[in-house]
Amino acid sequence: MTLFAATTEPLSATVLVVSGSSLMTVAATIDPMRACNRVTRRRLFEWRLVTIAGAPATLSCGLPLAGQGPLGGEAGGDLLVLVAGFDVLAHVDARTLTTLGRLYGRYRAVAGIESGSWIMARAGLLDGRAATTHWEDLEDFASAFPQVEVRADRFVIDGNLWSAGGASPAFDLMLHLIRGRYGHRTAMEVASVFIYDEAHAATDAQPLVSLGRLAVREPRVAHAIRIMEQSIDQPLTAAAIARRVGISVRRLETLFGRTLGETPAAYFAKLRLQSARRMVVDTALPMRDIAIRTGFSSLSAFSRAFRAHAGLSGSGLRRQSRLNRPE
């Protein structure tokens, strides 16, 4: 039986938090278990928080998070969850990967949250399996691990190996686990604790832009933005986008002006430059590669546009972000 099968038995989990993780992602992993215990008035989840060497993990916001011991000190359990974020592979050494390989057989399932799937792949657990990671890293993840079937889904369950793309998908994965084991009513009550709408399926794509209520207020603009997201590297004209949405260019421009205060072209350019900024700050990709991935015809065109957008060059922003990054 899988961990998602209906039961009344408790589940034991070990949660490894790696330095660079997001506080929100950690909370999205642990708090649904806590809330499940609260709403059912039973200890249906028991968890132990560990770090790589037992020392506090420094989260991406700078806060230290103390664990209850080092990874490897536990006997095993039902579920091992790997929560990671920025610079994940810089925080995980060969000894940790060896420990994970040894622990793999002690757990009924292993889950990688956000960059946790990078750890699983580096440890060889995902060879020939399907997985996801945060949408910003999907292309690099696929390039680094061609033996993994990379999906852009919110979360992926491939047998006893699970992965989720970030904080909100981790919450969705935990609700899916609670729903399978303890029923729809319990999952709804847990979601209600956090005033969270259970609206996402595992196979929903991870969006570059969280549209919120815009998708309800003006679905045609939301549709246009989704089209833009899918063509960052090969930008479409406003006319091509309007055709796909099924309206005229003039109507598309009117809708964008009314809802977002700018033209479709201006919004699309900003979206591409925001994607470029994330790659500059969060990756080591050469500027030429970033220019290609964000649809610029030349490095010089990219450099001019990026400087106008960010106030300094790509290499300058990268140096600045590394100087300001907490140790």
Image (spheres, rainbow, N blue to C red):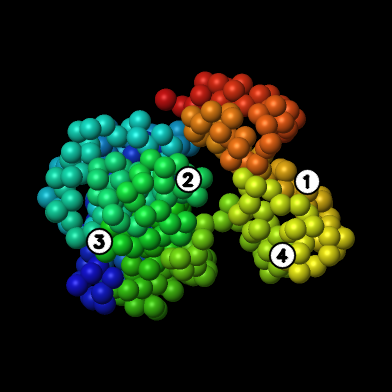
Instruction: Looking at the image, tell me whether mark 3 or mark 2 is earlier in sequence order.
Output: 2
Give the Cα distance between marks 2 and 4: 25 Å
Q: Which residue corresponds to the image point at 45% horizontal and 65% vertical from the top-left?
A: 203
Label 3 belongs to which residue? 160
- The residue labelled by disc 1 is 266
Mark 2 burial class by Cα count in 10 Å: few <14, some 14-19, many 20+: few
Q: Identify residue for label 4.
A: 244
User: Where 206 falls versus 98 (above or below)?
Assistant: below
The residue lying at 14 percent from left, 45 percent from top is 102
Three-letter residue code for mark 4: Arg
Mark 1 and mark 4: Cα distance apart in space: 18 Å
Say which element carries label 3: loop
Tag 1: residue type? Ala
Sequence-wise first label, 2 or 4: 2
Pointers 1 and 3 in contact (CB under 8 A)? no
Q: Would you name the residue on which mark 2 appears?
A: 139
The kind of residue on which mark 3 rests is: Asn
Mark 1 vs mark 3: which is more N-terminal?
A: 3
Crowd band around label 1 with a 10 angstrom C-alpha radius: few (<14), some (14–19), many (20+): few
At label 2, the amino acid type is Glu
